Image (tube, rainbow, N blue to C red):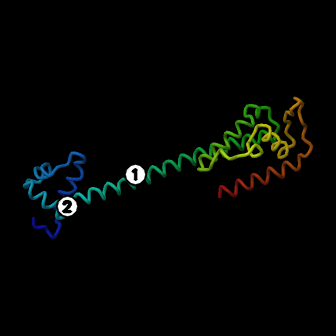
Amino acid sequence: MKSIKQETLRHKEAFEYYYLIGDKRSYSKVAKEFSVSETSIKKWSQSFNWAERVVQRDIEIGKKLEEKTKKAVVNEKANYRKIVNVLVSRFVERLKANDKLSLIMEVSDLEKLIKLDLLLMGEATDRSEATEEHKFTEKKIENAYNELYPEVKVKEEDGKTKEADKEDEAEDIISKINEKQRQKEQ
C-alpha cells in the first residue's frame, strides 16, 4: 500500500474522530463518518501512524491526569498540615496559660498530631529498629514538656502535681519554637 506524504486537515479530522471513538474505535466507523472506503482509512492510518499517535496521546493524557492528581494530593496535605499546626499551636498556648481546657487534649493526642504531620510530609512515623530509649512514651513526652514548659502542672508518677519554677526560661523556649515554626513556614 502506497503511503500518503502530506497530512491534510481532512486526515487530521479523521484521526481526531478515530481517537475520540475510544475503545470501540474501528476503521469502518471512521470510513462511514467521512464517507470514504475502509481501505482509504487504513491507508491514512498507516501513512500517519494512527496507532502510535493513539498510544502517545494516551500517555500524554495520563501524565497530565497524574500531575493534576499529585497537585490535588499536595494541596490536601497542605490543608491538613495547617489544621494540625493550628491544633498544636492551640495546645501550646493552653499549656502556657495553664488552661484547664488543655486537659481535653492530652499528650498522647499531641503525639498523634505530630505523627500525622510527619506522615503528611512523607516522613516515617515509626521506626521498626527503634530501641527502647528512642521510643516515644507518654511519660517521656510528659518529661520533655516538664522541661520545656515548667510553668505547667504535670502529674508525677506518685499522683502529685509538679509546680513550675522556671517560667522565664519556658517563655524563651516557647519563643524559640515559635520563631523556628515561622521560619519553616516562609
Helix, strand or loop for disc 2: helix
Quadrant (top left/top right/bottom left/bottom right) for the N terminus: bottom left
- In the picture of the structure, the residue carrying the numbered disc 2 is 12
Q: Is residue 40 above or below residue 139?
A: below
Q: Is residue 181 left or right of residue 20?
A: right
Query: What's the distance in space between the residues labelled 1 and 2, CA to CA?
Result: 24 Å
Residue 91 disc label: none
The amino acid type, in three-letter code, at marker 1 is Leu
The amino acid type, in three-letter code, at marker 2 is Lys
- In the picture of the structure, the residue carrying the numbered disc 1 is 65
The one of 56 and 149 positioned closer to us in this rendering: 56
Given contact means CB atoms under 8 Å apart, are the residues at marks 1 and 2 in contact? no
The one of 101 and 73 positioned closer to us in this rendering: 73
Circle 1 packing at 10 Å, graded few (<14), some (14-19), many (20+), is few
Q: Is residue 135 left or right of residue 185?
A: right
Q: Which residue shows up at 69% across the image and 58% down it?
A: 183
Q: Which residue shows up at 17% across the image and 63% down it?
A: 9
Q: Tally the numbered discs.
A: 2
Circle 2 packing at 10 Å, graded few (<14), some (14-19), many (20+), is some
Q: Is residue 142 above or below residue 122?
A: above
**Residue 106 falls in image quadrant:** top right
The one of 1 and 146 positioned closer to us in this rendering: 1
Helix, strand or loop for disc 1: helix
Position in image of residue 68 (x %, y %): 44, 52
* Farthest residue, direction top: 159
Quadrant (top left/top right/bottom left/bottom right) for the C terminus: bottom right
Position in image of residue 168 (x %, y %): 89, 49
Q: Which residue shows up at 82% across the image and 51% down it?
A: 173
Position in image of residue 116 (x %, y %): 63, 43
Q: Which label's residue is closer to the chain start, 1 or 2?
A: 2
